[in-house]
Amino acid sequence: MIASAVGVVDRVFAQVGKRVVGCVELRGTLQVQALSTVRAAPCPICRCWSGRLHGRYQRHLAERPILDQPVALCVEMRRFKCMNAQCPRRTFCEDIHALAGRHQRRTRSHARALHALGLALGGEAAARLAVELGLSTSADTLLRELRRLGAPRRTPAPRVVGIDDWAIRRGHHYGTIIVDLERREPIEVLEGREATTVADWLRAHPTIKIVARDRAGAYSEAVETALPSAQQVSDRWHLLTNLRDNIERMLQRLGAQMRQAAQQVVVAEATLGRQGLPLGNGLLAWQRLSDDRRALRLAQYEKVMALHAKGCTMKGIGRELAIDHRTVRKFIASGAFPERARRARGSTPLDAHRHYIEERIAQGCRCPRQIWREVRQRGYKGGRATVQSCVVRLLSPQGEPTLAWAPARTMPCPSARRAFGWLVGWRKLAVQEPKNSDHERFVQALCEIEPVVAEVRSLAREFLGLMQRRRPREFDRWLARLSKCSAPEMRSFASSLRSDLSAVRAAFKLPWSNGQTEGHVNRLKFLKRQMYGRASVELLRLRVLGKN
Ligand SMILES: [Zn+2]
């Protein structure tokens, strides 16, 4: 077993021309000693082989720990003399590229572990974990290693990219991220979001045929100058927000009509939820539960009394009904159904007004809200719920429904954003009917008061449908109708679409959009915050582009 393991180690070393000769423990570190078996090597400059030995030295390489023991390789290196008279190089060293990079003091496997940690966690956190794993290093070394590694090269060249900006420091300093939409991975992170920066990068990547971008001008300018033949695609989400902003602006202009429509919608008391108190038969949930329990107990009492009348013993009744015989005794001894004692309550601020409330109920008032308003005028400072539950408690033994009359209420005027939701039914970009009938009634009332709202509503819903169907011809017809819409906000939306028509039309034709890019921006922000903003954009770039 051990012999075969050593055989494997030998084979690994043989690949780089080394032979393991021993293994000793030195100051708590396992030192694996290997001699060189290389007889001749090619000169790195002139590639002429030379077997003329010039000298030898020991190279120390840190390796990953084994069984919690730090491991170091102590490798003999041979230096050869270049025999080519024309070569500027006098001597050169044998190459152990497969084992460790040039001038490196750790093996490739050790360096790989550090890279993976650095990419996953950034400098400080990775260094702390590395020490825990026995790979002694510092945050600075880790960052240096990451920089040396550089961003991975991506092949093949990108064809469809998404481009978006992200904040290095919000409001001050921005960066740009570029994502290969076909391979779903970020390919570049740039500092700055100016057209020139992006254009330079685009020029270096002439294979790009399609660029998805938001509706900002700088990126479209960059694509036009650097890759004029590339097709630009406007981001669909941004198109939708533009639509929403324009409709909201229109609704804000129609504030008076919105208020009028809201006044026409009488809200059923039941839809007010916690504001009113119409819980089924007017009882609170805990009261219904308590009533149910009392009914069960009463049924049990009646069964006990019936069996007792037949002459059964108390223990016999207990066994028959599966209840404690002491309960049976209590039932029989009490002579009448023993009501549960009411839980003792401490004094409440409402106590002073209890008499008044009883009086009002006797007068026939059954609306808790009305009573609450009255007690408040009499100096009560407590909450409405307390008054409501008190009224319900006083009314329920009489079997009287509460809220026999509640003042009819109209809908409060919704905000433009909310009304937009009811109007277009935009939830997760799908067309949905308004859930609440009051909302639909409000929309109908608004459409009757202001017919332009109905027109805008049908246009907006069609826009959402077009976005899913992707038929550019239909989009053209829709845009023609939008340009003739009576609402000025929609006409200005139409002209803004026309100003970027090629990219907007592509959004209705091609499957590409910038959703993926936004996702990568989110990941980038997460990585940025993980490093507390201390690391440079350079490190952030490496971590975003690193394969993780
Ligand atoms: Zn040479």
Image: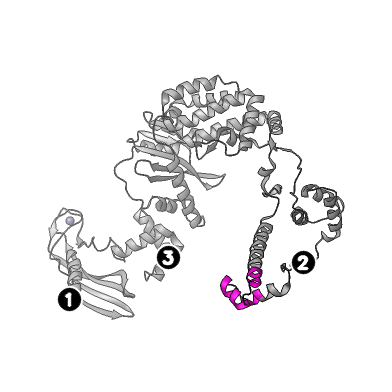
Amino acid at pointer 3: Ala
Mark 1 or 2, nearer chain start: 1
The residue that mark 2 highlights is: 345
- Is 348 left, or right, of 116 in this rendering? right
Amino acid at pointer 1: Ala
Q: Along the line of sight, which residue is nearer the eye, 514 or 110?
A: 514
The residue that mark 3 highlights is: 127
Above or below, comparing residue 508 to residue 145 in the picture: above
The residue that mark 1 highlights is: 3
- Is 235 left, or right, of 71 in this rendering? right
| Residue at 42%, 63% in the rendered image | 126
| Residue at 54%, 31% in the rendered image | 243
Mark 1 or 3, nearer chain start: 1
Q: In which quarter of the image is residue 414?
A: top right
Task: Report the magenta residues as a range.
Answer: 304-328
Picture coordinates of residue 338, whole percent (x, y): 72, 69
